[in-house]
Amino acid sequence: METDVDKSEHESEDSKHENNSVSEFQKDKHAMETKSNFSSLAHLVPTFERKFHEKVSEKLKNFPVLIRVSKIVMFEMVFLIFLLVISGFFALAFSQTIDSFNPRNNLAIGRDGPGLAFRPRPQEVKSTLIEFIHGGGGDWKGLTKSINKWYGTYGHGKNPGGMVKCKWDYIQDKHRRCHVSRRGLIDWSYHARCTKPDNYGYYHGRPCVLLKMNKVVGWEPEPYYNLTEVERLEKMPRKLKDNIVQTWEKNCKGKGVEKEEKCPNLRMIWVSCEGVTSADKEYAGPIKVYKLHGFPGYYYPYWNQQNYLSPMVWLQFRSLMPGVLVSVQCKLWAKNIKHDPKSPTKGGVQFEILMK
């Protein structure tokens, strides 16, 4: 039979065994927890690597697109440079075949000839009516400013270089231009002159109108040298015919056969101005065209010369009827200038004037 001592020994051993098993279980549990922590960390590392590789692979996937885009951009740049080189070559080759100042093909040359323009211009762009009140309280200042604006470009020193004083036998070239004298156009014997100090006659009721030919590159007039041919022109006013004959008699008659047959002073583009109807002619009164009654031929052809100035002619109404609208038609006269009754601007100009 077991004694109490033996029982106590057995109980102590059992308790020790249980304590040892509990401690071992705790150790195993701690070890398992430690192992699980390490395993979770171990799982995190592949996750980071996987994400990193995925990002890298995504970036690497874009490289072929970038390469293709760069190839397209390079091709476009090379193609553009090629086009620029080819275009520049042909532009340079074409520029060698054209004139720097003149058009290659001027359709107006040899057709109907140039037309005429006049100053002052009305404020209304499409209007051809010159309307004003003369005298000290008149409204003519706007018209005189219009003349000054265009006429002032002929002042001394404003268009330097390449200017010569031309004579009747002068042949125009592409690098020089004929001098246009403003003083030579004035009738200094008349009291209401076409000058700025005299307000171009608008103050005194003797209005002046400035005429100039339109520029046509390369066009050259064919003058009337034969007086018989001039007499046969039915539409030319009698007054202009007499002026042409007087010019020939004054400068060329009796000075040799060659000069009589081709008088240099008849190298002109003549100008005639008169009322459109019989009533217009009466109310307009005598119209003075001076000084040469036209444009000298040595100003032509026009070659777009540097600082070129168009020749001009003054037209003055010396007995204009106040309060009456007068229609005036001016024409240019040369063999190669055509007129059309239905189109007054063909080879000339038409305008209206009303003085109050």
Image: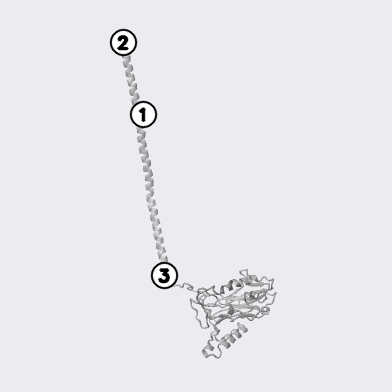
Residue pointed to by mark 2: 5
Secondary structure category for the residue under label 1? helix
Q: Which mark is residue 93?
A: 3
Q: Tell me which corner region of the image, top left, top right, bottom left or bottom right, holds residue 149.
A: bottom right
User: Which class describes the residues within 10 Å of circle 2: few (<14), some (14-19), or many (20+)?
Assistant: few
Which residue lies at the image location 39% right of the left edge and 51% below the top edge?
66
**x, y percent for residue 231:** 59, 86
User: Which class describes the residues within 10 Å of circle 3: few (<14), some (14-19), or many (20+)?
Assistant: few
Q: Is residue 190 left or right of residue 165?
A: right
The Cα–Cα distance between marks 2 and 3, rounded to whole angstroms, is 131 Å
In the rendered image, which quarter contains the C terminus? Answer: bottom right
Q: Which amino acid type corresponds to the residue marked 1 in the rendered image?
A: Glu
Q: Which amino acid type corresponds to the residue marked 3 in the rendered image?
A: Ala
Residue pointed to by mark 1: 33
**In the foreground, 264 or 181:** 181
Which residue lies at the image location 40% right of the left edge and 60% below the top edge?
79
Q: Earlier in the sequence, mark 1 or mark 3?
A: 1
Which residue lies at the image location 41% right of the left edge and 70% below the top edge?
93
The Cα–Cα distance between marks 1 and 3, rounded to whole angstroms, is 90 Å
User: Which class describes the residues within 10 Å of circle 1: few (<14), some (14-19), or many (20+)?
Assistant: few
Secondary structure category for the residue under label 2? helix
Q: Tell me which corner region of the image, top left, top right, bottom left or bottom right, holds residue 327.
A: bottom right
**x, y percent for residue 24:** 33, 23
In the rendered image, which quarter contains the N terminus? Answer: top left
Q: Is residue 59 left or right of residue 171?
A: left
Q: Earlier in the sequence, mark 2 or mark 3?
A: 2
